[in-house]
Amino acid sequence: MEEMRQEIIVQKVKEKEQKVKRFKISVPMILLYLLVLGVVAFTSMPLVYLVSTAFKPLNELFVFPPQFFVRNPTLRSFSELFLALSGNEVPFTRYIFNSVAVSVITVVGTWIVCTMGAFAMTKLKLPFKSKIYTIIVATLMFAAPAGQLTSYIIIQNFGWMNTIWALTLPKMAGSLFIFLLIQNFNVVPDALLEAAKIDGCSSWGLYYKMMIPMTRPAWATAIVFSFVGSWNDFFGPMLYIQREAMKTLPLALQLLQGGPGQVARAGAFAAAGLLTTLPTIIVFCFMQSKVINTMSNSGIK
Amino acid sequence: MKRKTTFFTLERKRAMTGYLFALPWLLGFLLFMLYPFVTSFMLSIGEITDLEGLQMKFAGFGQYVSLIAGDAAVEFAPALAITIWNTFINVPLILVISLTVSLLVSRKLPGKGIFRLIFFLPVLLGAGYAMEQIGGAGNILQVPENIFRYIRFYLNMEMATFLEELLMQVIGLFWRSGVQIVIFIGGIQAIPDTYYEAAMVDNANSWDALWKITLPMLSPMIFLNLVYTVIDSFRSLDNPITALIRDKTMRYNHYELGSAMGWLYFAVAFLFVGVVAIIFRRTVYYEK
C-alpha cells in the first residue's frame, strides 16, 4: 500500500517536471512570446519615453538628433514644475491632495454602491430585475455628453458646484461597473449561497462574507478602472470647478500650457505627465495580484 | 384562531432586502443616469424656455429631420460613418489581441507574473483616458509627437509615416483591450484543469486543446467581450460623434440639437449591438 502511494507520488512529480520541460522547450511558444514581447515594447514606448524625458537635463531635452534615453538623469524638471505652479494662490500640493481625495472617495463609493447593487441584482429577490437590467444595458450605449446639461443643472440645484461631491457622487452609480460586476456575480453558484443560508447566514453575511471574497478579481478590476477614470478626469472638473483651491491635478496642469517660456518647460510637461500617470501604475501594482488571480478561489470544482 | 396578517410577508421581506442592497445604486442611477437620459430625449423634441429650471415646450421632431436630411446631416453623417467604420475594423482586432494576450498570460510558465505585469501596464494606462493625456489632441504632452520626430530623423518620409500610422494603431488597440483581457483571463481560469488532463490522456496536443476545449468553454466570454467592445467603441469619448455632441452642447450651447444627435446615435448603436448579438448568440456554447 505504502509502496503504491510512493510510486504514485513519484509519477506525479515526474509528470509535473515533464510538463514544465515541455513548455520550456516548445520553439513556437518561445517565438510567439518574443513576438508579443516585441509588440509590448512597441506599445509601452510612449511611457518609456515619458519617464526618460522627465529626468532629462536641459541640454539633453533640445539636443538634435533627439535622444530616446536619458544620459544624466536629474530632478530639475520636477523642481521647475513645482516652481511654475507655485506662483498661484494655492500651493501645488493642494491640487495633488484634491485629486487624491476625489479619486479615493469615488473608488470607495463606487465599490460599495456597485457591489451591493450587483449582489441585489444577481442573488437577491428584487422586483423588476430584468427590466432594470435592460435599462442598464441600454444606458451603456448612451453617449454621455448628450445628458450633460441635465447633470449640470442637477448639480447646480444641489449646490454642489465647486465641491468635491460634484466630482464624486455622480460617478458612483454608473452602468458600466455594475454591468461588469453582474456578469461576474452570476458565475458564483447559488448552491454555495444556499448552503450558507441554511447554516444561518444573513443577507449581509452572504454579501460580506461570501460574495465579496469570491468576486475579488471582478471588483479589484472595477477599482483599478474607476481610479484611472477618476484620476484622469478632465471634463468633470472643467465643468463643475472654478475655485482655484478645489481644482484637481489634470485641470491645474493646464496652467502649464501657453504663455512665455512654454517651450523651455518641455521637461516640466514630462514631469507633470509622469506625476499624473504614476499613481495609476501604483494602484495597479497594488491590485495586480487580485486582478489577475481570477476565480482560482471560487470554491467549486 | 385567526391567522395574523402582517404587512411584511416573507415575500415582501425578501424584496425589501433586495431593495435595501440596491437602494444606493438605484438612487444614484436614477438621478445621474436615467434622469439625464430621459430629459435629453425630451430636449431633442423640445425647445428650452427656461434654462435654469430646465423648462421646455414641445417643438416636434424637426431636429431629427434636420439630422437625417437637413443642414445638420452635413456634420452628422460623415462622423457617424467614420464611427461605424472604426467599429467594424477595431472590434475584431481588439478581440483577437485581447484573447491572444490572455491565453499567453494564463499559461503555466515560469516568470508569467512579470509577463502579466508588462502586458498590463499599457492596458492600464490606456482605458482611453491616460491616452488622451499622453497623446492625441489637446494633450499636455507631445510624447508620440517626439517619438515621430525621432523616427523621421532616421527613416525616409514614406517609411516614417507608415511606421507612425502603424505605431498609433497598434498602441491604440492594445491600450483599449484592458477590460476584455481581464474578462478573458477570468474565463480561462474558470475552465477546470480536469478537462485538459482528460484530453492529454487521449493524446491531444495544446493546439487541439485550444480549439476543442478553451475556445468553446470561453465562448460566453467571447460573446460578452464582443458586445462590450462594440458598446465601448460607440461610447468612447474620443470617437468623432461623441466629440461632435460634446462640441454642440458644451461649446455652442445647442442643447436641443446635441440631444437629438445623442438619441439618433443611440438608436444606431442599439441597432448595431442588437444585430451583432443576434448573429453571434447562436455560436455561444453553454455548459449545462
Image (cartoon, rainbow, N blue to C red):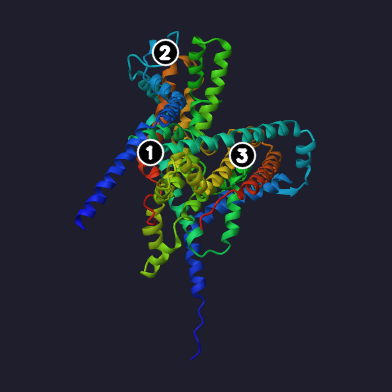
Looking at the image, residue B113 sits to the left or right of residue B264; the answer is left
Please report whichever mark, 2 or 1, sits nearer to the chain's N-terminal start.
2
Reading the image, the residue beneath label 2 is: A67
Decide: few, some or many residues near mark 3? Use Cα within 10 Å; few <14, some 14-19, many ≥20. Answer: many
Q: Residue at x 44, y 28 (%)?
A: A40
Q: Residue at x 56, y 64 (%)?
A: A127
Write down the chain letter for disc 1.
Answer: A
Residue B251 at x, y percent in the picture: 63, 32
Spatial CA distance of label 2 from label 3 is: 38 Å
Which amino acid does the dot numbered 2 rest on? Gln
Count of marks placed on residues: 3
| Mark closer to the observer (1, 3) | 3
Residue B26 at x, y percent in the picture: 53, 56
Q: Quadrant of residue A97?
A: top left
Write down the chain letter for disc 2.
Answer: A
Q: Which mark is residue B234?
A: 3
In the image, residue A129 above or below residue B175: below
Q: Residue at x 67, y 31 (%)?
A: B82
Write down the chain letter for disc 3.
Answer: B
Q: Are marks 2 and 1 in contact (CB under 8 Å)?
A: no
Looking at the image, residue B65 sits to the left or right of residue A122; the answer is right
Nearest the viewer among B149 and B5 is: B149
Q: Are marks 2 and 3 in contact (CB under 8 Å)?
A: no
| Residue most extreme to the bottom | B1
Reading the image, the residue beneath label 1 is: A283
Residue B164 at x, y percent in the picture: 54, 19
Which amino acid does the dot numbered 1 rest on? Val
Which amino acid does the dot numbered 3 rest on? Phe
